[in-house]
Image (cartoon, rainbow, N blue to C red):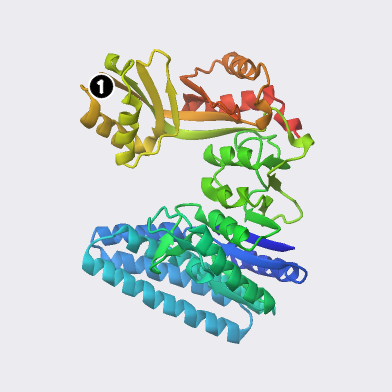
Amino acid sequence: MRLVIKYGGTSISTTKDIQKIAKYLSSLSKNNQIVVVCSAMSGTTDDLIEISESIKRENKSKAEQLAAKIINRHKQLAKQTIKKSDIQKKLLQKLDQDFTELLALIDGMVLLGEVTPRSMDYLISFGERLSIKLISSSLNDYGKKSIPLTGKEVGIVTDSNFGESKPLMDTSRLRISKIVESLFEKKTVPVVGGFAGADQHGHVTTFGRGGSDYSATIIGSCIKADEIWLMSDVDGLMTADPKIVKNAKLLKEVSYIEAIEMALFGAKQIHPRTFEPLLSKKIPMKIRSSFNVKNEGTLVSATPSKAAKNTVKCVSNVRNNGLIDIRGGSMVGNPGTAAKIFETLAKSGINVMMISQNPSESSITIVVKNTDLDKATNSLEMELLGKIIKKLEVTTNVAIIALIGSGMRGTVGVASRVFTAIQKNKVNVSMITQGSSELNLAFVVKNSDTNTAVRALHDEFTLDKIN
């Protein structure tokens, strides 16, 4: 088979884990053509973001200390993980070169006294640059031919929207397929850094947090992979958060559209745009655990089997949001009101997670992340209060509970079961939305009621007996 296998940061953060993965990959590559995609090691991206904060505060020595901490951690791992002295020596030299380049970049940013989106992308791409060298050298250590490649080197071409770039698929397809095919002919395993590519001028760009999954599906789509595996520290997609529901079950099979909904509603292990490159090619994807390879995980496919068409698949939750109720008599029958509200929020770079409008049009309720709440109310007050808005009411610390499952479509009585179960548990609902696709039903409760609501719905739809 032709496989793209992506590892998250938590899977490659200790000597034992790296050796185990290298051993597994070298045996898997005997009968399959594989491309490995890696995230940065746990904590590395956070340290790089902290470096940028230190630069903004003109604290050069703190930035250099953090850079030294990152490199020393990788060097330590290199010495403990790589047994063959020649391979280890080469790896340490390469890590030193990266360190020199990172310090030069910090110097440049300090001299300019600013952190631009472009320099920020260059800076945070270092996490993946370091991790791929470690994984690739570990494969060499096991006698397997392998080379590390950044997203730029493997041929991922994107637009120049730094921090949130999108791939230019046709150009990328030509470059990636050519580079990867030639490596397959030489029986070499490419280990590619996730999360980043480069624009047409060769400047490093990134896809945003969680973008390594996206890199894996872009590459998979370009080389016509048979399957894409996302390996992380969880067994797959679950019927609910196992920290909340003790008897939460692993979902054996879900459709692309259900998985997209799950990604948007709190399944942290997936970047929401991950599925875009797969939809036209219909490449199946597996979400699996890197620590438990005997478990097949969750299969995500275009057309799941009949057995997987349950009414409700899972109960997701996203905590720590704010609810803004926007009211005003002049909003009624006034075309373009909603457009003005959302345009104002978009200008401030605020993502609206949920929207509800009552039929009288006199109020619109939106949900944003708690961290965006101040910015959102500020910009609405500055731009629109007293014009089309009479009043803003804000509720902090609310959670979105979402029921997801394509079997809900056309099934009578789902909503009544949901709200009866919630009412029995004395939970108050402050907002409800259901899309016309009937794929998910979402509502808002207080943060403190999250666990009660999730458990009540998990029991109501007997999700512990799902497979």
Q: Name the spot of residue 241 as percent of width and height, x first.
A: 60, 37
Who's the residue at 62% across and 49% down the image?
280
The answer to which image quadrant residue 97 occupies is bottom left
Residue 305 versus residue 137: which sits nearer the camera?
305
For badge 1, the amino acid type reads Ile
**Going by the image, does 233 lie left or right of 348?**
right
Q: What is the quadrant of the N terminus in the image?
A: bottom right
Who's the residue at 29% across and 14% down the image?
329
Residue 392 versus residue 94: which sits nearer the camera?
392
Work out whether residue 244 can be spotted: yes
Q: Residue furthest bottom?
A: 86
Work out whether residue 7 can be spotted: no
Report the label total.
1
Q: Name the spot of residue 17 as percent of width and height, x first.
A: 63, 64
The answer to which image quadrant residue 394 occupies is top left
Question: Would you place residue 442 above or below residue 26 in this image?
Answer: above
Residue 123 versus residue 433: which sits nearer the camera?
433
Q: Name the spot of residue 388 as percent of width and height, x first.
A: 25, 21
Q: What is the quadrant of the C terminus in the image?
A: top right
Q: Name the spot of residue 3 as percent of width and height, x first.
A: 69, 62
**Residue at label 1?**
388
Residue 419 versus residue 50: which sits nearer the camera?
419
**Is the residue marked by circle 1 packed among few (<14), some (14-19), or many (20+) residues within 10 Å?**
some
Question: What is the secondary structure assignment of the residue under circle 1?
Answer: loop
Question: Would you place residue 259 above or below residue 431 in this image?
Answer: below
Who's the residue at 53% across and 80% down the image?
91
Question: Would you place residue 164 above or below residue 421 in this image?
Answer: below
The answer to which image quadrant residue 256 occupies is top right
